[in-house]
Amino acid sequence: MGYQLSRKTADEVFGKLKERYDIFAPKLFQGEGCFSDTDIIRYGKIDSLDEIEYERRSDYSFKEALIAINETLFYFTEDETTVPSCTDKKLLIFLRSCDLHALKRLDAIYLENGPEDFYYKRLREKASFVLMGCSQTCDTGFCVSMGANQTDQYDLYLKLDGDFVLVDCKSEELAGYFQHLETEDCAVTADYVTENKENVTLPKNLSVDSFQNPIWESYGSRCIGCGRCNFVCPTCTCFTMQDIHYRDNSNVGERRRVWASCQVDGYTDIAGGNSFRKTQGERMRFKVMHKIYDFEKRFGYPMCIGCGRCDAVCPEYISYANLISQLAKEEA
Amino acid sequence: MKNEYIPFPSQVKEIIPHTDIEYTFRMSFTKDVKPGQFFEVSIPKYGEAPISVSGIGEDTVDLTIRKVGKVTNKIFENYEGNTLLMRGPYGNGFDIENYKGKEVVVIAGGTGLSPVKGIVDYFSDHPDEAVSTTLIAGFKSPSDILFKKDFEKWEKTIQVIKTVDSAPEGYEGLTGMVTKYIPDLPIVDMENTVFITVGPPIMIKFTIMEILKRGIAEENIWISHERKMCCGLGKCGHCKMDSTYVCLDGPVFNYAEGKNLID
Ligand SMILES: Cc1cc2nc3c(=O)[nH]c(=O)nc-3n(C[C@H](O)[C@H](O)[C@H](O)COP(=O)(O)OP(=O)(O)OC[C@H]3O[C@@H](n4cnc5c(N)ncnc54)[C@H](O)[C@@H]3O)c2cc1C
Ligand code: SF4
Ligand code: SF4
Ligand code: FES
């Protein structure tokens, strides 16, 4: 159901929502970017609509609201393990169309691939999603090429429109916050883009034979293996588990999981100093094939949703979008 | 909802030392488990290590562990009368049914014998259920030989070729790589013969070359892949090759499929 609210009413609703929900949205962090003197947009808890960075795409994705960068799985004491408790509140997460398509990929790994992940599921069940429409394309995104530019899978659509706020509510859970308001019902349709600056054609004939393509080495040779492309990607889900003990009491410690990157040294290390993909070229191949080929073989749709974050963050200006298009061109 | 990451304590019932750095830990465990499956074994504050099942008893499982690093060192330091933490079993494991009524050849290198030991035990205890059973096991040197007691038992009921890469002068057993013994293996019916091979990647590679030379079809060869693993649950991504998660879909693969898995 669509509503047009005054900004004041919207702020009041927001205040009510805050009582029941932890609200996560992209925020601007000044001077904290990867390059010196740059800003960064990443997710954080917000207290008012004003804090949301509504115009520009976030550098980091919404995934950290569901999968912490560094998560304690449990604590060890002498003979026991204790699982940290989870927030009592529900979650409300602001994101864009491409991100909602990415959520389906996170679900595929964490809920469908093998047994369900306890930690993901307990947050996921609490989460509702607020779509921020896109009235214009971002710079490096190619969501249209990937079919991720549009979605109706949101719980709430919310658009800041001058003195007004336009809302479309699809979820019963959230409907109660709007139904009693004295507002005009109106038809609200979510903004989405139909064109990007970047267009990508997916290669159609990738196979194990594509491993031999020299393109991996040519793109990989510039890669410094920093892993940022993985950390910003809303569909990357890998982690490494590690144990630590506390310095002041070595009987106590914890087991954690930490985001991992297939581009970074150590990802495939096994005992005896062996590792499986040693060159950045092999790692580039592994990542790109996963994004556009082997994930699809397993789940039926490509992993990449074309948000363009990886290209925007790369300190070596390596363009994954160009790499894919080049693969397609070689096939033609 | 079950939290798959929480390990359970399991008591160390017995220790069977093989070499200075390789012991079998007989752990209490009563649920179902298959040869070729693995457990995530851990010591709190040190970490986890995937370890294959090397034997299955009434209310125990055997884990044969090689001491090579942080977690495994700690396991060796600190086991007596103790418990280890475990999660699992994980992975598909070997399906004995695939091998019944066949000429079965098991080729193992070093600790690679652990995951296939359950198969050898089975056909050694039930020799009538296979047309024939042969084990070719290779070790670096005589002092690296594992499962000595088991070999004595196996030698009574199945064909055993136990070889070492190199030995001091005067050693009376067989020497040479496992591959040396493949060309002369007596095989009656190629189509009814299955090979199961586990060991270091390089050994698997040359072993398979020799097996194929004998005219065995790829579909009749089974391998077990060892890869970096963290979770064992299809989540952490470390074990993925192509669209395959070794921890879920493996570690046991039919070679016709497994040969396409490139890191
Ligand atoms: C399916 C499977 C079955 C295995 N079965 C056995 C067995 O029966 N007996 C045996 O002795 N060893 C086995 N291994 C190898 C064993 O898991 C490693 O030797 C062990 O993890 C080393 O841990 P560490 O901390 O002592 O060594 P370190 O080298 O200090 O390890 C450092 C880190 O690397 C990780 N790591 C190292 N090697 C591996 C590896 N191969 N796989 C996954 N993670 C690794 C560890 O988890 C640890 O976090 C198996 C491995 C796999 C994947
Ligand atoms: S691979 Fe790049 S473009 Fe695709 S979803 Fe990940 S960050 Fe976005
Ligand atoms: S961000 Fe760029 S340099 Fe860093 S790992 Fe990714 S591709 Fe390589
Ligand atoms: S070991 Fe984590 S996905 Fe297989």
Image: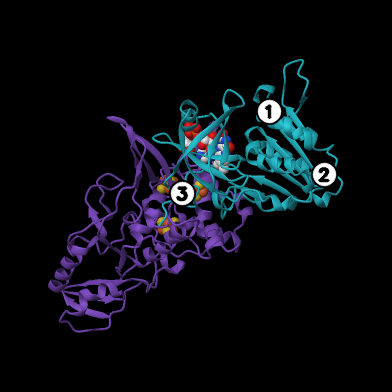
Residue in front for this viewpoint, B133 or B222: B133
| Residue type at tag 3 | Cys
Chain B representation colour: cyan
Q: Is residue B218 visible?
A: yes
The chain letter corresponding to purple is A
Q: Secondary structure at mark 2?
A: loop
Which residue, given by chain and number where applicable, does mark 3 sit on? Answer: B236
Q: Is residue A269 visible?
A: no
Q: Secondary structure at mark 1?
A: helix
The label nearer to you, 3 versus 1, is 1
Q: Residues within 10 Å of mark 1 (few under 14, many from 20)?
A: few
Total numbered labels placed on residues in the image: 3
Which residue, given by chain and number where applicable, does mark 1 sit on? Answer: B148
| Residue type at tag 2 | Arg
Separation of disc 3 and disc 1 at Cα? 37 Å
Q: Residues within 10 Å of mark 2 (few under 14, many from 20)?
A: some
